[in-house]
């Protein structure tokens, strides 16, 4: 398939996806992000993507999963932030309060560095798991048994816990 054909189909699918995205949100920025992320994920499988007779339903499922994962992340982040504020109030802190962002950024860099040392497939698998993908979804994505996915994520998590034992 030539780039010209690919671009024409992407434009066509973009408009359809944009109208489908209104089922999830009314925010124009979120809709654009949702459509863009959907097309980016679909382009990973460009060979399967354009010869599939049910391409719109396939893209809709991708979009739905992206939306669900973002919703989960926002929900967990909100719960974490509320818990953190509650802990700081319990310690006697009054708003506005600050955290040591320098220390947090250094810890984050250490975690990113540790993840970079992992094999590419394991790193990607772990990142998807952290984003909220279920073991079954990862099993389908990687074409591996669900038990293998569980054990790999368990081993990665244990390895990271061991590396960062002195941070806890």
Image (spheres, rainbow, N blue to C red):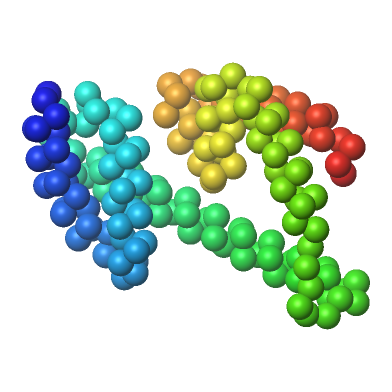
Rendered location of residue 167, percent (x, y): 86, 41
Q: Where, by quadrant of the figure, is residue 117 drawn?
A: top right
Q: Is residue 62 visible?
A: yes
Asked if residue 14 lies left or right of residue 109, the reply is left
Asked if residue 119 lies left or right of residue 60, the reply is right
State whether residue 39 is above or below residue 1: below
In this orientation, which residue lies closer to the viewer: 27 or 2?
A: 2
The residue positioned 11% from the left and 25% from the top of the image is: 2
Furthest-bottom residue in this view = 94
Rendered location of residue 149, percent (x, y): 57, 26
Rendered location of residue 161, percent (x, y): 79, 34
Q: Where, by quadrant of the figure, is residue 100 drawn?
A: bottom right
Number of numbered discs on residues = 0
State whether residue 131 is above or below residue 19: above
The residue positioned 70% from the left and 29% from the top of the image is: 114
Name the image quarter holding the C terminus: top right
State whether residue 27 is above or below residue 5: below
Rendered location of residue 76, percent (x, y): 61, 58
Name the image quarter holding the N terminus: top left
Asked if residue 154 lies left or right of residue 165, the reply is left
In this orientation, which residue lies closer to the viewer: 103 or 88?
A: 103
State whether residue 115 is above or below residue 63: above
Q: Is residue 148 visible?
A: no
The residue positioned 83% from the left and 68% from the top of the image is: 87
The residue positioned 14% from the left and 29% from the top of the image is: 3
Q: Where, by quadrant of the figure, is residue 119 drawn?
A: top right
């Amino acid at each position: 398939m030539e780039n010209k054909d690919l671009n024409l189909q992407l434009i066509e699918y973009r408009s359809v996806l944009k109208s489908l995205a209104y089922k999830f949100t009314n925010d124009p920025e979120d809709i654009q992000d949702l459509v863009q992320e959907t097309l980016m994920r679909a382009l990973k499988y460009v060979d399967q993507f354009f010869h599939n007779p049910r391409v719109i339903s396939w893209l809709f499922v991708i979009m739905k999963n992206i939306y669900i994962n973002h919703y989960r992340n926002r929900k967990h982040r909100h719960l974490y932030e509320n818990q953190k504020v509650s802990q700081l109030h319990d310690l006697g802190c009054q708003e506005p309060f600050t955290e040591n962002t320098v220390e947090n950024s250094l810890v984050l860099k250490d975690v990113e560095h540790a993840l970079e040392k992992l094999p590419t497939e394991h790193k990607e698998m772990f990142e998807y798991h952290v984003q909220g993908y279920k073991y079954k979804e990862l099993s389908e994505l990687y074409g591996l048994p669900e038990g293998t996915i569980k054990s790999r994520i368990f081993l990665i998590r244990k390895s990271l816990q061991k590396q960062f034992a002195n941070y806890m």
